[in-house]
Image (tube, helix red, strand yellow):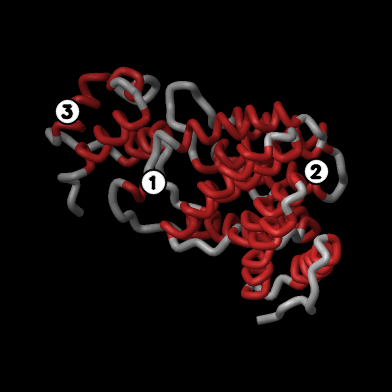
Amino acid sequence: MDYSVIGTKIKEMRKVVGLTQGDLAEGICTQALISRIEKGDIYPNATALYQISVKLGVDINYFFEIGTTPRLDYIREVERQLKSLRDTWDYKGMIELVKAEEKNPLFYKDNEKLQLLYWHKAIYLHEDRKESEAALTLLHKAYQMTAHHKKAMSEREMQILSAIGTIHAALNNHEDALDYYDQVETAMKTTDHLHEKAIKTKLFYNTARALTRSGRLNESTDYCLRAIKWCFEEELLWGLGELYYQIGYNYELTGDLEKALSYMQPAFHMFELKNDRVHIEFLEKKMNEMRKRSKGTGAFPHN
């Protein structure tokens, strides 16, 4: 196994997130040891490297390919299933999986594993049970399980803070929502290594929605355009339909129906590609109504 680049990568990431050698060493080892690791004189043991990766906000695999264990594979499979349930809005399935794993001692080995369950349980409480305050309490608890001011924010911590923002937005606390979204956006600027790139798309989209509801339509449109640019740069499809729709909706609110339709049309096509019947039917009806309001003629195009 080649350890020659580990010290260099640690040094690079430490500088990106704005930590001193002393900050990175705190609670792990001595500053002198971090210095020797970064110079390549020695390499950290597995425990120290894991702690360093957590503090830098990256997966340990960022430093080198590491063989997985059956236990780690199991945790990752649960995480994959929860993500799939989250992305398809299957909150019943989500809580069934969470309840099953709450009986599994593997998830009580460290805070990061238990945090995964708390995060998804909170989503269920908000989305299905409509117990928003209980969900917020649990999300804050989940975030504090791993968050620390002297380490970079992990992707999961970003997602948890975004979830807190989304609940505030649902409660019409739009300024609170925007504050949480801003914290996540600031954290993203310290890393170029997003494993799940759609996190950024979702953040910009949720920010845009909160700005629209606050009457800040131009800012909302700007966030959508930035997100669309990001999607094309990273070859991402997730969110393009939602983003084009949000821009169209902003123009609809200003009364510019022609411009609104010019953005809703590509949104419709993106939902067609995904065979998203709910959004297809919603947009088809909405666009036909808008054409009538603008005294347009012709049937809704399907090509």
Distance from disc 2 to disc 1, alpha carbons, whole Å, reads 30 Å
For residue 232, above or below residue 57: below
Secondary element at tag 1: loop
**Label 1 sits on residue:** 193
Of residues 13 and 303, the one drawn nearer to the viewer in this rendering: 303
**Label 2 sits on residue:** 126
Of residues 162 and 155, the one drawn nearer to the viewer in this rendering: 162
**Label 3 sits on residue:** 36
Secondary element at tag 3: helix
User: How many residues crowd mark 1 within 10 Å: few (<14), some (14–19), many (20+)?
Assistant: some
Distance from disc 2 to disc 3, alpha carbons, whole Å, reads 48 Å
User: Foreground mark, 2 or 3?
Assistant: 2
User: Foreground mark, 3 or 1?
Assistant: 1
> Residue at image x 54%, y 64%?
237
Residue 101, position as x, y percentages in the image: 68, 52
Q: Earlier in the sequence, mark 3 or mark 1?
A: 3
Q: What's the residue type where badge 2 is placed?
A: His
